[in-house]
Amino acid sequence: MGRTERNLVPICLYAVFGVVIAIATPAIALNQLVGISLTTALFIAASLSATDPVSVTALFRELGVDSRLTTLMEGERAKACSMMAWL
């Protein structure tokens, strides 16, 4: 069993809940504070919340971060991309 398979549950949790929180938080703030429609706020938040996991993974490797955390980040990237496409 590979590292990704062993860490599948936390990877999926990060991908699903991380994407939802990263989009919902700024969307609700935009909706409540600025007064734009929730649909528009969700589109803006989805655009703003995208991160660059490739550079984060490269930074992890450069800093010598634990390989499990790097695996979680790489796996989350794959799952989050499919989650974003679904949303």
Image (spheres, rainbow, N blue to C red):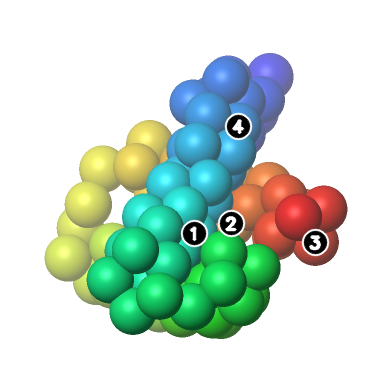
Element type at marker 2?
A: helix
Estimate the x, y position of residue 39 in percent, counting from the top left: 65, 68
Q: Nearer the viewer, mark 2 or mark 1?
A: 1
Q: Which residue is mark 3?
A: 85
Element type at marker 1?
A: helix
Q: Count the labels in the image.
A: 4
Q: Which residue is mark 4?
A: 12
Which amino acid is tagged 2?
A: Arg
Do the CB atoms of the residues marked 4 and 2 lie less than 8 Å apart?
A: no
Q: CA distance from mark 4 to mark 3?
A: 15 Å
Q: Left or right: where does residue 54 sit relative to residue 30?
A: right
Q: Quadrant of residue 1?
A: top right
Mark 3: few/some/many CA within 10 Å (<14, 14-19, 20+): few
Name the image quarter holding the C terminus.
bottom right
Q: What residue is at 57 percent from the left and 20 percent from the top? A: 9
For marks 3 and 1, the one nearer the N-term is 1
**Picture disc at residue 69:** none
Q: Which residue is mark 1?
A: 23
For marks 2 and 1, the one nearer the N-term is 1
Q: What residue is at 34 percent from the left and 42 percent from the top? A: 69
Q: What residue is at 57 percent from the left and 64 percent from the top? A: 38
Which amino acid is tagged 3?
A: Ala
For marks 4 and 3, the one nearer the N-term is 4
Q: Quadrant of residue 64?
A: bottom left
Q: CA distance from mark 1 to mark 4?
A: 17 Å
One can see residue 66 in this view: yes
Mark 4: few/some/many CA within 10 Å (<14, 14-19, 20+): some
Q: CA distance from mark 2 to mark 3?
A: 12 Å
